[in-house]
Image: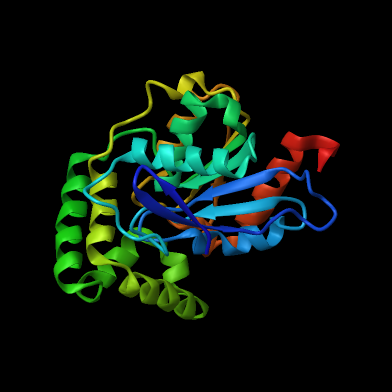
């Protein structure tokens, strides 16, 4: 995987490159949710790569990105994403962020509007973490750092995945692949990521200034960022469109990959018009 160095940290990413015969095709940048990597957008990238250049970042300490020195916050990750967009010279981009990636996307759209062609926010929130959830995150992060994912696997699955997906036997290989990835991650780096989410600042006072066409989508069964959070985003961002994805929890791109892929493809085509 290619690596970007920003502010002393190494940030890995994947890049599909421009579609054949389409060197000027728009770029879609994907920002994943906590405990995942760009892998969680595999289905969406497969759907879109014929029309778009698809770039998926692995946030610090997650996926293929090594942990950085000390902790970080959502502003740090926003600067990483901005540095990547500028390094590749692909602005303005379509930015797609799920959960943690959505915290980043809102910041970029509000503060660097010239970098975005559109914004898609999946299963995310404009607010700081609620106190009870933040405490739960901190406790789970310390358990995970000391003993790994094993003892906290079940509660983590219930938080990150909806009941329909968890009950489907066909989901087991996908869940196991995710757990195997988590097992290979540096524990300290992942703890930094969890604490960054638990301690994040809200962005609700800034997102009313977002001008990019915005799609807000959320799993109907999302527990960490329930529908009311996405509805709040859609109310705050002028002209934002809200979609609720049936039979999906917090990780909608994995739980309902076809539904999310088609929703995203339709939205991007609408934004770009005949250009793509």
Quadrant (top left/top right/bottom left/bottom right) for the C terminus: top right
How many marks do you count on the picture?
A: 0
Residue at the (70%, 59%) spot, across then down: 47
Residue 79 visible in this rendered orientation of the protein: yes
Quadrant in the picture for residue 206:
top left
Q: Nearer the viewer, residue 125 or 25?
A: 25
Classify residue 162 as left or right of residue 41. left
Quadrant in the picture for residue 199:
top left
Q: Is residue 152 above or below residue 223?
A: below
Classify residue 68 as left or right of residue 132. right
- Give the percent coordinates (x, y) of residue 38: 50, 59
- Give the percent coordinates (x, y) of residue 1: 52, 64
Q: Is residue 124 above or below residue 179?
A: above
- Give the percent coordinates (x, y) of residue 183: 31, 74
Q: Nearer the viewer, residue 172 or 210?
A: 210
Q: Is residue 212 above or below residue 89?
A: above
Residue at the (29%, 40%) spot, across then down: 73
- Give the percent coordinates (x, y) of residue 155: 26, 66
Q: Is residue 208 above or below residue 60?
A: above
Q: Nearer the viewer, residue 63 or 239?
A: 63
Residue at the (51%, 29%) spot, across then down: 109
Residue 217 visible in this rendered orientation of the protein: no
Q: How is the image coloured?
A: rainbow
Classify residue 45 as left or right of residue 166. right
Residue at the (49%, 37%) spot, across then down: 82
């Amino acid at each position: 995987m290619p690596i970007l160095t920003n502010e002393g940290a190494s940030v890995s990413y994947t890049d599909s490159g421009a579609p054949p015969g389409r060197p000027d095709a728009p770029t879609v940048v994907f920002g994943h949710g906590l405990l995942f990597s760009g892998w969680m957008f595999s289905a969406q990238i497969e759907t879109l790569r014929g029309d778009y250049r698809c770039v998926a970042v692995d946030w610090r300490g997650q996926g293929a990105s090594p942990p950085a020195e000390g902790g970080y916050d959502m502003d740090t990750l926003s600067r990483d994403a901005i540095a990547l967009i500028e390094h590749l010279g692909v602005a303005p981009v379509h930015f797609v962020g799920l959960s943690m990636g959505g915290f980043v996307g809102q910041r970029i759209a509000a503060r660097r509007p010239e970098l975005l062609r559109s914004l898609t926010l999946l299963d995310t929130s404009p607010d700081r973490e609620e106190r009870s959830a933040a405490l739960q995150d901190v406790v789970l992060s310390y358990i995970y750092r000391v003993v790994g994912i094993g003892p906290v696997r079940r509660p983590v699955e219930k938080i990150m995945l909806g009941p329909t997906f968890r009950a489907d036997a066909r989901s087991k290989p996908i869940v196991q692949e995710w757990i195997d990835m988590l097992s290979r991650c540096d524990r300290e780096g992942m703890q930094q990521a969890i604490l960054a989410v638990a301690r994040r600042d809200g962005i609700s006072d800034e997102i009313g200034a977002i001008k990019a066409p915005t799609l807000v989508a959320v799993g109907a069964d999302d527990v960490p960022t329930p529908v009311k959070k996405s509805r709040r985003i859609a109310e705050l961002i002028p002209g934002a469109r809200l979609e609720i994805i049936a039979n999906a929890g917090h990780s909608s791109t994995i739980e309902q990959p076809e539904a999310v892929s088609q929703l995203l493809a339709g939205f991007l085509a609408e934004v770009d018009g005949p250009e793509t």
